Amino acid sequence: MRVVVGAMATAQGLLCLSDAANWTVDLITCLALVACGACLLIGFLTPVVSILITIGTLAHTLSWLPMAARGPFDGKAASFEMIVMAVALSLLGPGVFSLDARLFGRHEVFIPPASRTSKS
């Protein structure tokens, strides 16, 4: 899921950058999408970056102004799917094969066995 969301964000950002006519308006948004998508692809700061992608996609979906280039986020259904996947990704974390796992280590949750009390 991390790769799909990262690839979609990077593709949308690159499509936006390829439209040189509207660089002044969308340059920061396009660069942010490319940077966030690249971070997701390598698994760096996954929860933070996926929240940023969620906010950016939500802002684009609710905006009256269209983005510079047509791309994967054109339809409301595609935007909604991207928002849901990015929120789920922010809650799930980066996964085993990511830069975060290499830098910070894998986190395992140990649940102790329930103590059984005898009822008399």
Image: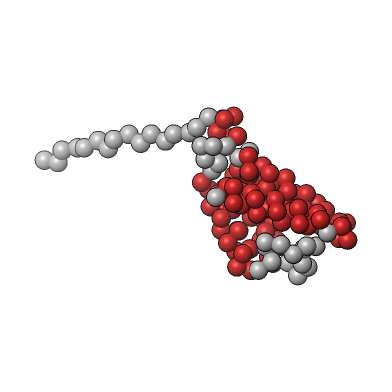
Q: For residue 21, which quarter of the picture?
A: bottom right
Q: Nearer the viewer, residue 49 or 15?
A: 15
Residue 116 visible:
yes
Residue 95 position in % (x across, y down): 52, 40
117 vs 77: above or below = above
91 vs 112: above or below = below
Q: Which image quadrant: the C terminus?
A: top left
Left or right: 107 in relation to 33: left
Residue 91 position in % (x across, y down): 53, 48
How is the structure coloured here?
secondary structure
Left or right: 117 in relation to 108: left
Left or right: 53 in relation to 69: left
Q: For residue 94, which quarter of the picture?
A: top right
| Residue at 60%, 58% in the rendered image | 82
Residue 36 position in % (x across, y down): 69, 46
Residue 45 visible:
no
Please count the marks in the image.
0
| Residue at 29%, 35% in the rendered image | 113
| Residue at 59%, 35% in the rendered image | 100
Residue 106 position in % (x across, y down): 50, 32
